[in-house]
Image: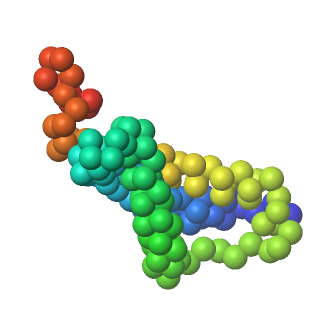
Amino acid sequence: MAPSSRALGSLALAAGVPFIAFGFMDNAIMIVAGEEIENAFGVRFGFSTLAAAGLGNLLSDVVGIGTAEPVQAKFNKWFPMKPLTSRQQVLWQSRAAKFGGSAAGVSVGCLLGMVPLLFLDGHKGKEGQTALE
């Protein structure tokens, strides 16, 4: 028997909330760390902008992974999910709800994680505007 719409919504929400935290931490730290790595090591060691971004991404992924699990544990404690049977968990509806929630969560988190761009002025265009202006 397929899970109810309410159970699928609960599953999507439970999957998505930790990914909001992951996406936020991932993008925000990558932007700030990449900028700092480029400023500190770019000229001195010949790092390209992409190399600095890659190192910033490495740092942000590690922090993001460490953030997602505690957020999920708190969320599950505050908003317990209706348990699905093992058969229901493998149904396409359940997998789609989990994927959809995760994808939506990481998308929202990554967009929110772009906030540091509002405060960085190192990459102004020829008209003096930052990327988000």
- Where residue 37 appears, as percent x and y from the top left, is 30, 51
Q: Nearer the viewer, residue 112 or 51?
A: 51
Q: Nearer the viewer, residue 117 or 103?
A: 117
* 36 displayed left or right of 78: left
Residue lying at 47% horizontally and 57% vertically, measured from the top left = 58
Q: Quadrant of the N terminus?
A: bottom right
Compared to residue 1, the image places residue 78 above or below, namely below
Compared to residue 45, the image places residue 128 above or below, namely above
Residue at the front extreme of this rendering: 45
Residue at the top extreme of this rendering: 127
* 40 displayed left or right of 87: left
* 35 displayed left or right of 63: left
Residue lying at 45% horizontally and 47% vertically, measured from the top left = 54
Q: Nearer the viewer, residue 5 or 54?
A: 54
Q: Is residue 64 visible?
A: no
- Where residue 21 appears, as percent x and y from the top left, is 42, 62
Residue lying at 58% horizontally and 55% vertically, measured from the top left = 102
Compared to residue 51, the image places residue 126 above or below, namely above
Q: Quadrant of residue 127?
A: top left
